[in-house]
Image (spheres, rainbow, N blue to C red):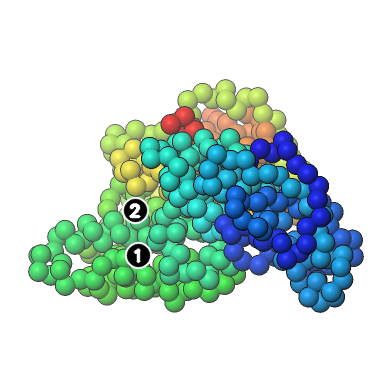
């Protein structure tokens, strides 16, 4: 359709139809407010309409389906003629084909709703699926990159990684938790569910490879196990709990495969899985009790010099990641809420928790296991690591994820402790929100001949892990834009 031609015209209400591929499936959350506004003021902007070749009805061309539904409601309630004759902006259907015109209308509705920010994630995913279906019918040879380019040209910006998440959500989640998804389950939590499914399926397949064929054939399909775990949580998004779904899936998998619950939990629990890959080992059939594992770590700390030898061995096995250029921090200035942090008062940060044996660099598992080298997995690790770092100072409630895969940290509402200021500054710096002083961060990261470093080794490993994940996420997104 040619958007340059338009005519203002009055159309009877019974000649108007909603766009049949409208991205919005659920009721507009602002429906009642919009209705009262139209009742009191009328329409602020005329709906944009068009007409398919050979049809006698007009359809909404770009946004306005909610307003059309409201006009029908008000007409039935009042029979006031001001709701019957609707001033519309008519644009002729000039597309070369019916499919091309439908695609143009669908993208117009999608962009309009995206600007208002009122579609749920699953509604956007289903709309994009319709776009893909129409586009494939129009072009026998196409790629995901071509689709991303098309959407970008129409004003709807999306990455190939987001397309993959949308497709997986429709295939693996929508059949079992439609109410949860339509209730507004976020992109972040949807990604977490998909990561949970991917990790668990990989573990399931790996275990089945060790079974005799006759026993493997007696097992149900993993898709059925995952479906059973999900269906009992098909409820409003406000009640969503990833931990409850993890627990249900862990129980079903452990019972079906006759494995210990804790063994499966190493895969299904996000924190246990992250720690497992950081230590460079896959889940094993038998594990000591948690208390026994802690005793092993304490033995290293109790013997003089043993922790140092243990750390050195790990450093020999795994190269430790360090900042490439210390001057990268030099151009930032300290600007945290409240008073400036006093380094002399932050020494207790290092003494707060006894330092465990050093953890190998995050780069080792990012490079060795493709499962953890995708934008979705990196986003999950970034979110988890930033949350854990913030939790060291009781600031985890300030952490939130973003649709770009990065984390965000909100400004504190009250006065922070000296420790809280340090962590808030660090995370704000990594989130790209706050400049910081090079001298402050050098002292916190490395210390000096006179004063020990502010961050202990466990915290330092998490910081470097977060930095590496952020770097790798940006690399993946950059590669996606260029591919």
Image quadrant in which you'd find residue 169: bottom left
Dot 1 crowding, Cα within 10 Å, few <14, some 14–19, many 20+: many
Residue 407 visible in the snapshot = no
At mark 1, the secondary structure is helix
* Left or right: where 308 falls relative to 128: left
Residue for point 43% across, 31% down: 483
Q: Position of residue 339 (x, y in %)?
A: 77, 43
The reply to whether callout 1 and callout 2 are in contact (CB within 8 Å) is: no
* Quarter in which the N terminus is drawn: top right
* Left or right: where 173 falls relative to 319: right
User: Residue 276 has which mark?
Assistant: 2
Residue for point 9% across, 65% down: 212
Up/down of 102 relative to 225, above or below: above
Q: Position of residue 386 (x, y in %)?
A: 54, 48
Q: Position of residue 156 (x, y in %)?
A: 60, 42
Q: Earlier in the sequence, mark 1 or mark 2?
A: 1
Up/down of 393 relative to 173, above or below: above
* Left or right: where 358 falls relative to 418: left
Dot 2 crowding, Cα within 10 Å, few <14, some 14–19, many 20+: some
Residue 118 or 435: which is nearer the viewer?
118
Residue for point 78% across, 66% down: 71
Residue for point 38% across, 53% down: 275
For mark 1, what is the residue? 265
> How far apart are the two marked residues, 1 and 2, measured between alpha carbons?
11 Å
Image quadrant in which you'd find residue 170: bottom left
Residue 27 or 263: which is nearer the viewer?
27
């Amino acid at each position: 359709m040619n958007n340059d031609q338009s005519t203002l015209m009055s159309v009877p209400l019974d000649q108007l139809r909603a766009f049949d591929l409208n991205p919005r499936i659920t009721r507009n959350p602002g429906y009642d407010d919009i209705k009262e506004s139209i009742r009191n003021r009328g329409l602020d902007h005329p709906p944009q309409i068009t007409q398919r070749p050979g049809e006698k009805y007009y359809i909404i061309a770009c946004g306005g389906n909610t307003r059309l539904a409201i006009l029908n409601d008000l007409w039935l309630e009042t029979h006031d003629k001001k709701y019957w004759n609707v001033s519309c902006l008519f644009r002729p259907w000039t597309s070369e084909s019916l499919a091309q015109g439908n695609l143009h209308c669908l993208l117009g509705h999608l962009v309009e709703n995206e600007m208002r920010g009122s579609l749920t994630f699953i509604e956007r995913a289903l709309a994009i699926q319709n776009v893909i279906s129409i586009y494939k019918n129009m072009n026998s040879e196409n790629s995901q990159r071509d689709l991303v380019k098309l959407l970008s040209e129409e004003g709807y910006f999306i990455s190939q990684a987001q397309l993959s998440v949308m497709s997986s959500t429709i295939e693996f989640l929508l059949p079992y938790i439609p109410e949860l998804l339509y209730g507004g389950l976020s992109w972040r939590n949807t990604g977490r569910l998909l990561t949970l499914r991917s990790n668990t399926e990989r573990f399931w397949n790996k275990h089945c490879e060790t079974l005799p064929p006759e026993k493997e054939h007696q097992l149900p399909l993993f898709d059925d196990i995952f479906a059973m775990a999900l269906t009992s949580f098909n409820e409003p998004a406000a009640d969503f709990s990833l931990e409850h779904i993890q627990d249900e899936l862990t129980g079903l998998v452990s019972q079906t495969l006759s494995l210990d619950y804790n063994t499966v939990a190493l895969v299904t629990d996000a924190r246990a899985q992250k720690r497992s890959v950081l230590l460079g080992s896959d889940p094993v059939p038998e594990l000591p009790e948690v208390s026994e594992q802690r005793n092993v770590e304490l033995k290293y700390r109790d013997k003089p010099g043993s922790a140092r030898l243990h750390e050195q061995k790990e450093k020999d096995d795994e190269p430790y990641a360090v900042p490439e250029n210390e001057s990268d921090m030099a151009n930032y200035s300290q600007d945290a809420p409240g008073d400036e942090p006093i380094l002399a008062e932050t020494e207790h940060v290092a003494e707060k928790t006894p330092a465990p044996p050093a953890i190998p660099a995050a780069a080792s598992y990012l490079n060795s296991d493709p499962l953890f080298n995708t934008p979705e997995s990196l986003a999950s690790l970034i979110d988890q690591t930033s949350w854990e770092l913030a939790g060291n100072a009781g600031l985890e409630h300030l952490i939130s994820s973003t649709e770009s895969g990065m984390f965000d940290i909100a400004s504190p509402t009250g006065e922070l402790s000296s420790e809280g200021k340090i962590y808030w500054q660090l995370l704000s710096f990594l989130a790209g929100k706050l400049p910081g002083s090079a001298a402050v961060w050098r002292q916190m990261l490395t210390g000096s001949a006179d004063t020990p470093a502010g961050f202990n080794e466990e915290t330092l490993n998490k910081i470097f892990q977060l930095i590496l994940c952020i770097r790798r996420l940006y690399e993946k997104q950059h590669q996606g834009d260029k591919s």
